[in-house]
């Protein structure tokens, strides 16, 4: 037999897409696992022509699920970001959009039983230690995907998946402000380095001579901007204590500008070597926290709400996303209790994905 078959679900989670796998069906050691995922996605080609990736960082993501041994969680969610062209896998970050599909996938895999019209799935994000409560619409037959919820960046409507994120501060660096400062300066660019759900380097768009309203395509074509941004990201990431920044997708980068479409603030998010076509769920939490924290680069660009929870509406390259943040102000910034978002998910296909036996023969 020349190929190894691995059972999988192919799902859209939020504005991302990829295979959802049972961790028990995969190799234990990360080096072999990385080679399996590279072969599965087809990493190393701009179109991922020899795999099931989609030629974009939002379509080369992988979710791996396990019944959790944690007293609180039902499911352990292990995430991998597979490179489109670089034949590499980053196990450091997590992905909130892909997490949108974890609850439905766990039910589809038989790891969680449907509980009625709505099933609660408690998820532990293995990569960062965050806890997430996912509310999935279900019936006796399983997951209900039809509904009236819509999210910018995805056509049509679907059943809502409500997510409540907890324990998201310092998941990668151990600190809300990894450098200890509200503002740092690298290459004459003022940035806020923050670790909430995802470690990020956040700057004003104007610091790069941008409006902050550019399309994703226009930004991707701006090679001078990406070169300057990457230099700042690497220096900031090193100051945050993150290892191998140049070859890692963390920290991510975000730009801010005053809102122009009725939201709280305009944003652009980078993955980091391409512009995100919409907005990462994890990045949205970090950007919302930056907006709510006095003294950051967001100062003066958005009115801060005194509501608890506060709804922060981020304008992104394809529309808007709302983040409900439950928090308290502290001397060091904010004490984030939880962040809530609504996403959607859909099962696209199920079956077996084939990889060459020379990569892994089980």
Image (cartoon, grey):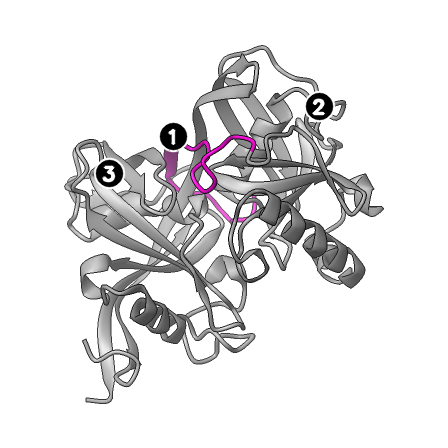
Contact (CB < 8 A) between labels 3 and 1?
A: no
Question: Alpha-carbon distance for marks 2 and 3?
Answer: 38 Å
Residue 67's spot in the image, x, y percent?
A: 17, 46
Mark earlier in primary sequence (2, 3): 3
Is residue 211 visible in the rendered structure shown here? no
Rendered image: mark on residue 167? 1
Residue 248: x and y, percent?
52, 58
Residue receiving disc 3: 138
Q: Badge 2: how crowded within 10 Å, few (<14), some, or many (20+)?
A: some
Local secondary structure at mark 1: loop
Residue 184 shown left or right of residue 3 in the figure: right
- Residue projecting furthest to the top: 306
Secondary structure of the magenta portion, mostly?
loop
| Element under disc 2 | loop
**45 lies left or right of 24:** right
The residue wearing badge 2 is: 302
Residue 157 is inside the magenta segment? yes
Q: Give the quarter of the figure containing the C terminus.
A: bottom left
In the rendered image of this protein, does residue 55 appear above or below residue 193?
below
Which region is colored magenta? 152-177
Task: Calculate the distance from the C-alpha at mark 3 to the C-alpha at mark 1.
Answer: 27 Å
């Amino acid at each position: 037999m020349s190929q190894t078959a691995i059972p999988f679900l192919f799902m859209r989670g939020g504005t991302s897409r990829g295979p959802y796998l049972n961790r028990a069906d995969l190799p234990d050691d990360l080096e072999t696992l990385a080679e399996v995922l590279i072969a599965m996605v087809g990493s190393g080609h701009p179109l991922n022509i020899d795999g099931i990736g989609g030629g974009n960082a939002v379509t080369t993501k992988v979710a791996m699920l396990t019944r959790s041994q944690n007293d609180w969680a039902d499911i352990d969610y292990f995430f991998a970001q597979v490179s489109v062209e670089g034949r590499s896998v980053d196990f450091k970050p997590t992905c909130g959009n892909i997490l949108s599909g974890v609850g439905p996938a766990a039910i589809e895999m038989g790891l969680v039983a449907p509980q009625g019209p709505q099933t609660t799935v408690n998820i532990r994000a293995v990569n960062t230690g965050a806890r997430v409560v996912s509310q999935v619409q279900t019936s006796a037959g399983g997951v209900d995907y039809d509904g009236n919820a819509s999210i910018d960046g995805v056509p049509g409507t679907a059943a809502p998946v409500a997510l409540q994120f907890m324990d998201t501060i310092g998941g990668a660096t151990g600190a809300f402000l990894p450098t200890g400062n509200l503002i740092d300066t690298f290459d004459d660019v003022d940035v806020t380095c923050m670790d909430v759900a995802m470690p990020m380097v956040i700057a004003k768009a104007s610091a790069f001579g941008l409006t902050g309203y550019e399309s994703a395509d226009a930004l991707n074509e701006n090679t001078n901007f990406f070169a300057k941004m990457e230099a700042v990201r690497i220096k900031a990431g090193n100051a945050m204590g993150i290892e191998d920044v140049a070859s890692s997708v963390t920290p991510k980068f975000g730009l801010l500008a005053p809102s122009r479409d009725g939201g709280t603030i305009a944003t652009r998010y980078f993955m980091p070597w391409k512009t995100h076509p919409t907005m990462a769920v994890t990045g949205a939490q970090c950007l919302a926290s930056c907006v709510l924290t006095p003294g950051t680069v967001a100062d003066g660009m958005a009115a801060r709400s005194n509501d608890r929870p506060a709804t922060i509406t981020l304008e992104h390259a394809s529309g808007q996303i709302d983040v409900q943040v439950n928090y308290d102000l502290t001397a060091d910034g904010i004490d984030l209790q939880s962040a809530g978002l609504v996403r959607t998910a859909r099962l696209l296909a199920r079956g077996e994905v084939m990889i060459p036996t020379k990569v892994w023969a089980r």
